[in-house]
Image (cartoon, grey):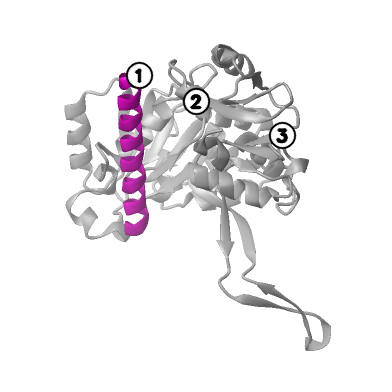
Amino acid sequence: MNEKTERLCIPPEYSVLEAIKVLDETHERIVLIVQDGILQGVLTDSDVRKWILKSGDMAEKVTAVMTKKPICILEGEDSHAMTLMERHGIDAIPVTDKGGRLLDLLFRYETPEKKKRGGAPLTSPVVIMAGGRGTRLLPYTQVLPKPLLPIGNATILERVIASFREAGCASFYVSVHYKKNLIKAYFQDMHPDYELKYVEEEDFLGTAGSLYLVKDKIREPFFVSNCDILLDVDYRKVMRFHREQENVITLITSLKNYTIPYGVVNIGQEGLVESLSEKPEMSFLVNTGVYVLNPCVLDLIPPEKFMHITELIRLCLERGEKVGFYPITESAWEDMGEPESMTNMMKNHMEAREEKEADRKERSNV
């Protein structure tokens, strides 16, 4: 078994939360539950998502959530791996011997065929909020608007668009205000192979307020994204989930884990100490800033008035409308809203680029 596969192995005693941490640390979509070398099951990001949607306990053992009879191949049958992954819609497949001992884990993106996500291409429009001043990223945004800040060899706005293009989206509305002429000039020189329209705000209207300007242009469920958010998610699955759940709004959320760096005192009755918790961990579902909206909710937005999307969500909840969430793991969300997070995003994409280059050189030497 190679080192990469070993890093993805966890014992059956692990909790769901501990398994999620391994998913985040390894940046893969799967962990392997192994005992005495024998594969007991697998846990994918999809399994985690279903567990969160069921409001499952994060302290539960991973064996309660894992897939106990995963699709596997036997040693020496590697040539069938891609066919099986395509047939079952999975991105990784364990290799075992006849006794169930884990030998390896093969990934779709490591096969000669290009990795691709299944499903028909999306035709859903995408609205990207790119009009803010980016005050948290000063002094960078005194020179360039946030959407044009470079992440590796592309701007953050290009990367956001590319993440939706991977799912097939080809119609984009970009809400602009601050330094809008720089943004428009940049993309005009690019001659993109997708439809790009600008929604120009005379005054800054907020995330929901600017959506009023596309009210008469969008007739189907559509995505809304901030311009500084990158998600590693299959938007086809997100849209399918939104439609199946019959939501009017679906928030894409990330599971965030926090460790309180102190011993916490738990108080009982009559002012007595009941117990102590040393550096307890807490988990929260955090709004990533990417949504799916039905066009009907645009009727709730007042014309040319400032409005946050959180206010629009509150209005929908007050009206008894169905608002849902689609959970992803922490490592699947990158946010460059602040200098430190922007630096981390740049570092991650540089490392990913170096990994791809090293892998390309290794393959060329084979």
Along the line of sight, the residue nearer the viewer: 362 or 285: 362
Side of 151 where 121 appears, left or right? right
Q: Residue 38, labelled with which disc?
A: 3
Amino acid type at image mark 3 = Ile
- As helix, strand or loop, the secondary structure at mark 2 comes to loop
Along the line of sight, the residue nearer the viewer: 350 or 240: 350
- As helix, strand or loop, the secondary structure at mark 1 comes to loop
Residue where numbered disc 1 is placed: 366
Residue 326, visible in the rendered structure: no
Q: Earlier in the sequence, mark 2 or mark 3?
A: 3
Residue 195 coordinates in the image, percent (x, y): 32, 23
Amino acid type at image mark 1 = Val
In space, the residues marked 1 and 3 are separated at their CA atoms by 31 Å
Amino acid type at image mark 2 = Arg
Along the line of sight, the residue nearer the viewer: 202 or 77: 77
Residue at the (50%, 25%) spot, across then down: 219
In space, the residues marked 2 and 3 are separated at their CA atoms by 52 Å
Q: Earlier in the sequence, mark 2 or mark 1?
A: 2
Q: Residue 219, labelled with which disc?
A: 2
Residue at the (54%, 19%) spot, across then down: 118
Q: What are the residue bounds of the magenta stretch?
A: 338-366
Q: Earlier in the sequence, mark 1 or mark 3?
A: 3
